[in-house]
Image (tube, helix red, strand yellow):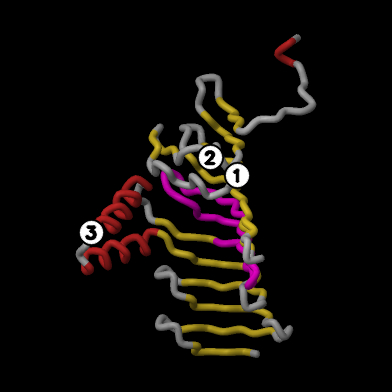
Amino acid sequence: MEKDKIHKHIRTERMEIVEPDGTVRLSLFNSKNIPPALMDNEDILPGHRQDTGMAGIMFYNSEGDESGGLLFSSEKRLDGGYNSGLSMTFDQYKNDQVVQVLLDEDEKGKTYGFRVFDRNSAHIKDTVALSKAMKETDDPEKKKEFESKLKAQNVLRMHAGKDRDGSVGVNLYDKQGKQRIRLYIDNDDMPRFEIFDAEGNVKHKLQ
């Protein structure tokens, strides 16, 4: 039957996998057809990710909300420099990424690995509104207040991978995003272990 026909080769700039009712569950796209950031059937960040050169795959939950994806891009500059990046993320319900696999590279170095984030229970629309208010205010105190609230809503808790200094290891952070434990092998192949206090001072070291 025609509906069961197998196509050996499909060329397209964007493709969507949808449910019978039309709800999008997966989107494949090139850099000129990046889908909007959908939440509650609304584009919550008009223009977001456009003109970045990124292509990839976007994931959506059963409600049609963006719930993560795979993005990748690269750029080679006239001066001989370059940058290349890849990120796969998985999002918290009605919020942003809590798990990420990433590669960030340029002519000066690279970092890559696995990251875990804490996010509060706020709806991402509230976060977007807070970010907009921060950008629009001219009051330095208000701006600092908004920055503090935004930082508290997105806290890096773990990075496992390779850093730009050449070390490979695991970095653990507290609920305020401050580094507390670092276990790594440095660029000279020396194993090291460090424990930090809440102010960022090394309190215990093993090497």
Picture residue at 45% right of the left edge, 41% below the top: 37
Q: Residue at x 67, y 74 (%)?
A: 168
Q: Are marks 2 and 1 in contact (CB under 8 Å)?
A: yes
Q: Amino acid at mark 2?
A: Ile
Q: Can I make out residue 113 in this image?
A: no
Query: Where is mark 1, residue-wise?
Result: 55
Q: Earlier in the sequence, mark 2 or mark 1?
A: 2
Question: Can residue 29 be seen at all in this image of the molecule?
Answer: yes
Identity, as a three-letter code, of the amino acid under mark 3? Thr
Q: Secondary structure at mark 1?
A: strand
| Distance between mark 3 and mark 1 Cα atoms | 33 Å
Q: Picture quarter containing residue 174?
A: bottom left
- Measuring 62% from the left and 78% from the top, which residue is drawn there? 165
Q: Residues within 10 Å of mark 2 (few under 14, many from 20)?
A: many
What residue does disc 3 label?
Answer: 137
Residue extending farthest front: 78
10 Å neighbourhood of mark 1: few (<14), some, or many (≥20)? many
Q: Main secondary structure of the magenta part?
A: strand
Q: Are marks 3 and 2 in contact (CB under 8 Å)?
A: no
Span of residues in magenta: 86-115
Secondary structure of the residue carrying numbered label 2: loop
From the top left corner, tell me how far across and down residue 198 is, in percent: 41, 81
Q: Residues within 10 Å of mark 3 (few under 14, many from 20)?
A: few
Residue 87 picture quarter: bottom right
The numbered dot on residue 34 is 2
Q: Tell me: residue 66, above or below residue 154.
A: above
